[in-house]
Amino acid sequence: MDTTKRKTVLALFFLSIHTLLLSGCWDRTEVNDLAIITVAGLDLTDDHKLELSVNIYATKSSGGQQMGGMSDSSGGGAGNLVVRSATGLTMADAVSKLQQMLPRKIFWGHDEVFIFGERLARQGIVEVMDYLTRHPTPRERANVFVSKGLAKEVLKLQPPIEQSVSDSLREMAKSHTGLNITLKELAQMMAGKTKAAVIPWIEIKPKQDGQEAFQFIKGTAIFKNGKMIGRMNEQATRGIMWLRNEVKNATVTLAPEETKGYVSFFLLRSHTRLIPHNEGDNWSITAKIETLDDIVENSTDLNLFEPKHTKKLEMALGSDIKKRVNVALAQAQKMNADIFGFADAFYRKYPKEWNRAKDRWDEIFPIVKVELETKAKITRPGLTGKNLFKSKQR
């Protein structure tokens, strides 16, 4: 056999092998075969069963009939959102019961939000978290929230701006005006040294004056050993974020002393460093908080181009930060929930001392002394130092 024939035979052989390998996706799963979950709500029923409610994005062919639920506004017949609920003894049992109600296979890959109802949160979420972290399909980067009342009621809302409840809550969390906690971070806190955790608290603003009902973040739910033990309002939540080094976006408004009016600051950058100290049975922490800010509004008679005025405003801003942090710290120590990561800070610097005292941390944390050192720096007073619309200026 000459060289040309040999090359032809080899080419035909490899072509036939490739043809066998490209025979098609025999085990494919089409999008139209999936019940795509976008948000899940978990509640505790009156008979102490777990109720799982989900928003399902049901794809459909163009021109198909709409199912009951919220239709997608993007046009073209892309799909719609449907709310379905099922109850079970456990999370896995509820998922199984939900699957029996659906003609499509449940798909968790696009579920970016989990909401725990208030009753379930107070009862405990340990069993639910075991399923969400053990099962391979729930997304570990999904955001978690606790709702006032039933989580199922949040799923029924139709946000006026975003296309779905999932999109709305996720964008609120990403804005960092409140805490932004993922499933992975919640699991790490619950399994951490202190078993204390924080989750954003959401409420529903009822329909009024022609405005549809909508959900919004209002503070923080505090957890200890997997159970919700209390709440903190928006002011205390900002204190939590300062100590956890999680403040990304913020606008702070102050009323300076010795003048009338307000000055508003916009946060550009911030950093918090925890420095632990241990001397025998004395445990203390120095929290150094530094921030860079711009002034975005001035309704006082102060000329902000004057260094003496900006220095006073920097001190006032530092005092306001201390006030918020002290509110959060006092409430956390009263609840005996180390939600700031103090235990981790002590472990990193004093591993031997921590190991000897870790079983007594619930006795130590409430009496840990915290010294706050704040350094606020105003980088720019704005385009106008003076308020152009006030006749008298200092």
Image: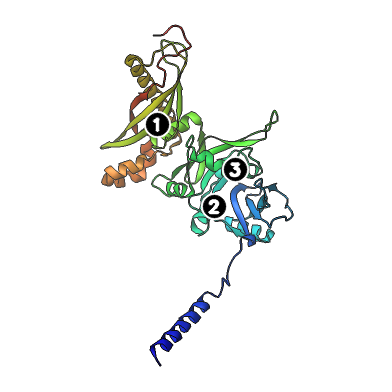
Residue 163 position (above or below residue 327)? below
- Foreground mark, 1 or 3, reads 1
Residue 94 drawn at (x, y percent):
62, 56
Among numbered discs 2 and 1, the one appearing first in the sequence: 2
Horizontal side of 343 relative to 169 (left or right) equals: left
- Foreground mark, 2 or 1, reads 1
Residue 228 position (above or below residue 236)? below
Q: Residue at x 39, y 13 (%)?
A: 303
The residue beneath circle 3 is 119
Q: CA distance from mark 2 to mark 1?
A: 38 Å
Check disc 2: other Cα within 10 Å, few if <14, some if 14-19, many if 20+. Answer: some
Q: Residue at x 45, y 86 (%)?
A: 9
Q: Quadrant of residue 26?
A: bottom right
Residue flagged by tag 3: what amino acid is it?
Arg
Residue 288 drawn at (x, y percent):
32, 31
The residue beneath circle 2 is 128
Residue 375 drawn at (x, y percent):
33, 26
Q: Residue at x 43, y 39 (%)?
A: 337
Residue flagged by tag 2: what amino acid is it?
Val
In the image, 296 versus 320, the foreground residue is 296
Local secondary structure at mark 1: strand
Residue flagged by tag 1: what amino acid is it?
Leu
The residue beneath circle 1 is 268
